[in-house]
Image (spheres, rainbow, N blue to C red):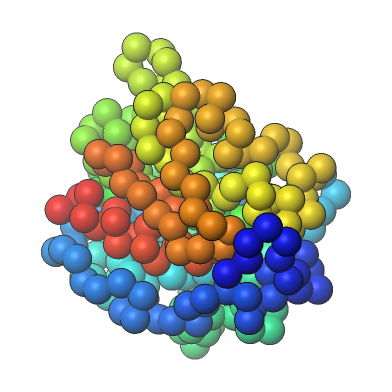
Amino acid sequence: MCRGSCNLGSQGFPAPSAVPGLHQAPSDRMGNMCGAPKKVLIVSTSAKSMNGHETGAWSEEICGPYYVFKDAGCSVEVCSIAGGDIPIDKASVAGDFYTENDKRMESEGNHALKGTPMLKDFDVTAYDIVFFAGGHGTCVDFPTDAIGAAVSKVLAADKVVATVCHGSMALVHAKAADGTPLVKGKKIACFTDVEEDQVQLTKKVPFLLASKLKSLGAILEEGAPWSDTATIDGKLASGQNPQSSVKCAKLALVAAA
């Protein structure tokens, strides 16, 4: 794994050789932990660029959880903020970053990523798990009052919210019943400031996500850069980076059991 300085690939992300367990299938990364809930909604960004940087959703952060949930027997739907085809960050499907989960999705025609409905058209409280996938596109369209309200509704209904990597942008505007930040006092994992610096996008993001969540009172669970790090606090599961996608999804299943 990358510690301190990191061996970066051509697009700013760590070289695949520096990332342990990158190509493992979901069943290889973490054992089956619980029975499956019935309904899961995966939410993706619709943003293709961030402050002049071409981006989108990170493929593994959708595909990894998608197959964790499908293979566990869940009914899984995928939506996006603006609807339509999900923009996939090219870096996430380049070379060795193209995971077995991504390949499986492609073999099925990428059907789950095409023509997605808009999040606003869903009753999020009707789902056992609402999973917010990451990618730098989320920096554009996740930290909004509307997304924060959706997160708050799910948790208020005693359902599960899960976020991975920059998907934790969805938590920034979420409020508890008393109007305080929902993340206050909660254990959260998200893309760290160190990782943001290593991918050389510190000056492109609207704010450093980890620092922002800390300022809102979150208790950050920070693993080593690019480590498989995920945590759970009640009905809120979260993962640090793409490598944590599958573990985060399986923790969400535990929370929903």
Residue occupying the far top of the picture: 178
**Relative horizontal placement of residue 33, taking residue 11 as reference (left or right):** left
Which quarter of the picture shows residue 125? top left
The residue lying toward the viewer, choosing from 77 and 31, is: 31
Residue at 81% over, 73% down: 10
Residue 30 image point, x, y percent: 30, 72
The residue lying toward the viewer, choosing from 19 and 36, is: 19
Quarter of the picture containing the N terminus is bottom right
Residue 204 image point, x, y percent: 80, 44
Residue 170 image point, x, y percent: 51, 38
Residue at 77% over, 65% down: 12
Whether residue 139 can be seen here: yes
**Relative horizontal placement of residue 139, taking residue 106 as reference (left or right):** right
The residue lying toward the viewer, choosing from 36 and 7, is: 7
Residue at 32% over, 17% down: 177
| Above or below 204: residue 251 | below
Residue 106 image point, x, y percent: 53, 82
Whether residue 112 can be seen here: no
Residue at 68% over, 84% down: 95
